[in-house]
Image (cartoon, grey):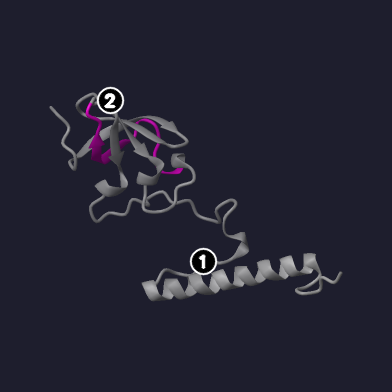
Amino acid sequence: MPLAVGSVVEGTVTGITNFGAFVELPSGETGLVHISEVADVYVTDINEFVKRADKVKVKILSVDPSGKKIALSIRQAQEGASATRRIPSGPRPGGGGGRARPAPGSFEEKLKRFMKDSEDRLGDLRRNTDSKRGGRGSRSF
């Protein structure tokens, strides 16, 4: 049975790497679910979402003409269901720098938050740079 791009099939996770998970398809072929295609959230550790021998639904994204490379997606195979079923609770290591993340909103709200955050960071950077130089315009020869 040839694999049809866009179809959703059930497969078994056969291996996990730091960049994704290998899934054996019903046809016996193995494809890769890249870490970016595991869930709708940022995935730092794929082991928090899938385990070896898990049965997962995957969407076939592409098949190499030679048939050796098959790109799969768990995230796109989820219809109406959230792909974020195993989100770990608590803060993520190395993230945010202590800044709280506000709840998602409209695009305009997100853009305003982004602009304010960018201006705050740029101001911090300028203050740090100015203090190392002794302030702006203080160079005298």
User: Hey, which residue is sitting farthest front in the picture?
Assistant: 141
Q: Magenta segment: does it hold 50?
A: yes
User: Hey, which residue is sitting farthest left in the picture?
Assistant: 1
How many numbered tags mark residues here?
2
Q: Residue at x 75, y 69 (%)?
A: 130
Disc 2 residue crowd, few under 14, some 14–19, many 20+, Cα 10 Å: few
Q: Magenta segment: does it hold 66?
A: no
Q: Report whether 4 appears left or right of 35.
A: left
- Name the amino acid, label 1: Arg
Q: Position of residue 67 (x, y in %)?
A: 23, 26
Q: Where is residue 63, by image quadrant?
A: top left
Q: Nearer the viewer, residue 107 or 96?
A: 107
Q: Report whether 129 appears left or right of 19.
A: right
Q: Where is residue 73, by image quadrant?
A: top left
Q: Nearer the viewer, mark 2 or mark 1?
A: 2
Q: Magenta part of the protein: which range?
A: 48-65
40 lies above or below 141? above
